[in-house]
Structure formats: C-alpha cells, structure tokens
C-alpha cells in the first residue's frame, strides 16, 4: 500500500484543501494552528490519510489516520516535513500535544 501514497504541498491560500485538512485534523482531535504556513498531505485513493504543517522551523499539526497507523507512514511524513522546514542553520522543532509525546517520540529520531 505504501507505493500508492501521494504527497502534496498545500499553501494556506488553498481554501478547499485547507478545509479538508481542518476536517481531518478535527477527526484526530487537533485543529489548524494559525501559524502554519504550509502543509504536506498524504492521500491514498483520493482520501486524506495524513498531514503535517510547518510554521517557520516548527513542525505542527501532524495527524495520521488510525486506519494506516503502523505502516511506517509517520517517518516518511516526518522526513518530508523536515526537508521542507530545513533552512540549513536553525534547529527544527516538533510540537506534539502532551498526550501524544511518548508514542510519537518513540517512533522517530526526535529527542525530548
């Protein structure tokens, strides 16, 4: 299934796509952070299954559909987000709600 994923960059000005992201985040108990400038979305069969946003050098608003958790998608999405956020000098930060910290950090190479 991993090869069927489509990664897309979405700017805040793309209202229709932003509405879809907002709905997806809400389904995952999150909301769109007003400081996020751009999102990366992951779709499969025209259905949004994951997304994450960038606000400067901070990764925020990361959600993965429960139906695809455990497929390794989080690490691939994180890589795309890091590549987008990296400016060569500033460190990159990952904002995670406290309730998700342990699970998220254990599945990637981030330090607390």
Image (tube, rainbow, N blue to C red):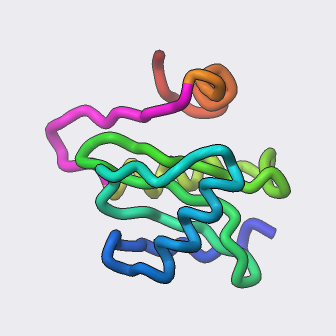
Closer to the camera, 53 or 4?
A: 53
In magenta segment, residue 94 = yes
Please provide percent x and percent y for residue 75: 60, 46
Q: The N terminus appears in which quarter of the rendering?
A: bottom right
- Span highlighted in magenta in the image: 85-97
Q: Is residue 99 above or below residue 44?
A: above
Residue 6 position by quadrant: bottom right
On the image, the x and y values in percent for residue 76 come to: 58, 53
User: Along the horizontal axis of the image, is 106 left or right of 52?
Assistant: right
Please, which residue is most extreme toward the right here? 67
When asked about the image quadrant of residue 98, the answer is top right
Q: Residue at x 60, y 68 (%)?
A: 42
Find residue 19 and report its horizontal and vertical position in percent: 52, 73
Give the x, y percent position of residue 92: 31, 36
Which residue appears at 25% of the width and 32% of the height? 91
Q: Residue furthest left?
A: 89
**Which residue does the image show at 35% across and 63% down from the upper left?**
38
Instruction: State left or right for residue 31 relative to residue 55.
Output: right
- Residue 67 is drawn in which quadrant? bottom right
Image-based side of 85 in relation to 72, left or right? left
Look at the image and say whether residue 71 sits in the magenta stretch: no
The number of discs equals: 0
Predominant SS along the magenta part: loop
36 to 30, vertically: above or below: below
Q: Is residue 24 above or below residue 96?
A: below
């Amino acid at each position: 299934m991993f090869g069927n994923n489509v990664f897309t960059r979405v700017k805040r000005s793309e209202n229709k796509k932003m509405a879809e992201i907002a709905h997806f985040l809400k389904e995952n108990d999150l909301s769109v952070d007003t400081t996020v400038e751009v999102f990366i979305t992951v779709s499969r069969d025209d259905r949004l299954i994951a997304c994450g946003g960038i606000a400067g050098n901070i990764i925020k608003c990361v959600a993965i559909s429960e139906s695809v958790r455990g497929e390794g998608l989080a690490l691939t999405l994180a890589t795309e987000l890091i590549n987008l956020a990296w400016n060569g000098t500033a460190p990159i930060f990952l904002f995670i709600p406290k309730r998700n910290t342990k699970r998220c950090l254990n599945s990637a190479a981030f330090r607390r």
